[in-house]
Image (cartoon, coloured by chain):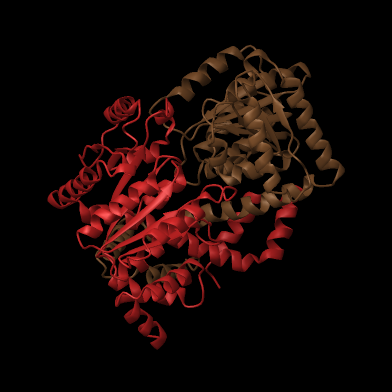
Chain colours: A red, B brown
């Protein structure tokens, strides 16, 4: 192995936060050595518990994640937080909010927060999040929380790699629980109704129960509904207990490994697709792609035959 | 060419609605012959104008699309509507609503409505929508409207193939305009404030203007804001005029082809990614994939090296 990488890994595993930040940047930006680094780190990963938390904007996810992090810190566990925000760069809210959060935890090296907002050129946010999780895991963090805004396919892809997925809702969504995309409802292992001191918490609970009654989970688990008021620390202990319950259930039913194998089946296919796409892009080159796109746009060439031809060539060189 | 396909195409282009429905199903379900059919249809496509309409649930998109379709029908133009609903299959609302709509227009073969709600096994909704658009276009429809619920990446991908993209908002969204994902704000060529007789229409308009002032479009177009009350037919003519204005602008500035070339660059990459995914799946094979995923899940094998090895082999077979 490259001796530089060996040194990196030693510093990383000794808990050095600066090295951790550099390793994450390397992986996130696909900087030289990223692939070798991930290969070397992978054998050290697999020990952290990974929590995925998602929900619509304004549900209070960051506050809830912070409270949960504090709770686990009191228990002596080290925490890594990946805050993924695929929403508008117009507002800048995520970045500003994140700065404030980082300052607040600055005195505690046991909490490391990293925010990611941009879709990488290769592979997308889901893949980058997965890779950053591997780095945090290998660095020895006990617990990793992946927090993402939204209720669409992006978020399903991002939180899929978590051991436990938590969907955070709030009262006052009206019929909007109905419009939450199916994929998200299905992957939630635990529901949280945050800001549950507001009017309408019972309505949200009823809606979740109705949706649950329409769809059976194949693992036999019935996701509990935990009510919280994160800003006041209410319900955090109950949420941590619900997380433990689910993990115990997975252990008891021997489902933990199954779930991980299922996740890896999806991830391997996605990683392979991305690797092949990268290869195809290289083969096409930017100028060539523009020329081909122009020919298709002018209807001189049919795109279906074209793509078949390129796909057949990909991988040969 | 396969003589069956030749017959199909002749019937399709003669305006036969039953053949149209069958061709769309073939493409949507990737039934035998789908690829050959698309290749044969592509040279006949490229004449229809494609409008993409999206917005949050409850914005009144279907009503607006119906009114717009009526408007264009009075003008003698034939219309195809693709209603894409990537939201929850729990509710079934989309399908019910669609039945009612189809009955209403049943007497007029000049309006063809097709609803799509499920993500296909291969490629996503965006690709299927694009392929169905090609079929409708080749069948000789003058105008195709793609209508989709939501404001996320899914919707950006779906409406990207439109010549004109219309984002429909409603009063009473509060600060939610801020949380609409950036991609959607950027692709909107025209903003509609529907239900504009309600309180708060001015607020929505002000918010759009603020967001617009923060981001310049690279084509120099300033998306107009059209106020409608679709249920009463108010503002439909103004919307149609705004659509014409934008099309005239694209023509005048010679931007129409550029836009199409840009769209095709993205689409070719996506089509290639889907084709390569198929290849990756085939290469991994189901049994083999399960075994490899288990080895990775148990940390006996690192996924990064594994994917590299498979990608190198890809295409050789």
For residue B84, which quarter of the picture? top right
Query: Where residue B233 sits in the image (x, y, percent)?
Result: 68, 15
- Kindly give the residue lying farthest to the right in the view shown: B252
Above-or-below relation of B133 to B157: above
Query: Where residue A197 sits in the image (x, y, percent)?
Result: 31, 32
- Kindly give the residue lying farthest to the left in the view shown: A252
The answer to whether residue A249 is left or right of residue B180 is left
Above-or-below relation of A131 to A90: below
Whether residue B30 can be seen here = yes
Between B164 and B212, the one lying in front of the other is B212
The answer to whether residue B264 is left or right of residue A110 is right
- Which residue: 51% across, 77% down? A32
- Which residue: 65% across, 42% down? B211
Above-or-below relation of B46 to A50: above
The answer to whether residue B219 is left or right of residue B303 is right
The answer to whether residue A227 is left or right of residue A105 is left
Query: Where residue B6 sits in the image (x, y, percent)?
Result: 66, 36
Quarter of the image with the C terminus of chain A in it = bottom right
- Which residue: 78% across, 19% down? B76
Whether residue B72 can be seen here = no
- Which residue: 73% across, 26% down? B239
For residue B10, which quarter of the picture? top right
Quarter of the image with the N terminus of chain A in it = bottom left
Query: Where residue B20 sits in the image (x, y, percent)?
Result: 61, 28
For residue B4, which quarter of the picture? top right
């Amino acid at each position: 192995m490259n001796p530089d990488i060996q040194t990196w890994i030693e510093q990383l595993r000794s808990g050095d936060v600066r090295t951790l930040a550099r390793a994450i940047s390397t992986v996130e930006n696909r900087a030289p050595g990223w692939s070798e680094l991930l290969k070397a780190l992978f054998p050290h990963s697999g020990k952290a518990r990974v929590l995925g938390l998602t929900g619509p904007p304004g549900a209070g996810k960051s506050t809830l994640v912070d409270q949960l992090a504090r709770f686990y810190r009191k228990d002596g566990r080290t925490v890594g937080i990946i805050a993924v925000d695929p929403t508008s760069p117009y507002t800048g809210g995520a970045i500003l909010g994140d700065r404030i959060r980082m300052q607040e935890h600055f005195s505690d090296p046991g909490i490391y927060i990293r925010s990611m907002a941009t879709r990488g050129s290769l592979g997308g946010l889901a893949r980058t999040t997965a890779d950053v999780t591997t780095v945090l895991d290998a660095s020895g963090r006990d617990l990793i929380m992946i927090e993402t805004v939204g209720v669409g396919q992006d978020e399903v892809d991002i939180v899929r790699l978590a051991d436990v997925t938590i969907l955070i809702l709030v009262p006052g969504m009206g019929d909007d629980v109905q419009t939450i995309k199916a994929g998200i409802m299905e992957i939630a292992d635990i529901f949280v109704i945050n800001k549950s001191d507001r009017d309408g918490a019972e309505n949200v609970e009823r809606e979740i129960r109705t949706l649950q009654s329409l769809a059976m989970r194949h693992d036999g688990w019935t996701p509990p509904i935990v009510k919280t008021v994160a800003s006041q620390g209410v319900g955090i202990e109950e949420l941590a207990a619900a997380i433990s319950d689910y993990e115990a259930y997975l252990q008891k039913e021997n489902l933990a490994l199954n779930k991980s194998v299922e996740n890896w089946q999806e991830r391997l296919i996605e990683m392979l697709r991305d690797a092949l796409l990268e290869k195809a892009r290289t083969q096409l080159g930017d100028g060539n792609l523009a020329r081909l796109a122009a020919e298709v746009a002018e209807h001189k060439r049919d795109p279906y035959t074209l793509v078949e031809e390129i796909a057949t060539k990909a991988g040969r060189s």
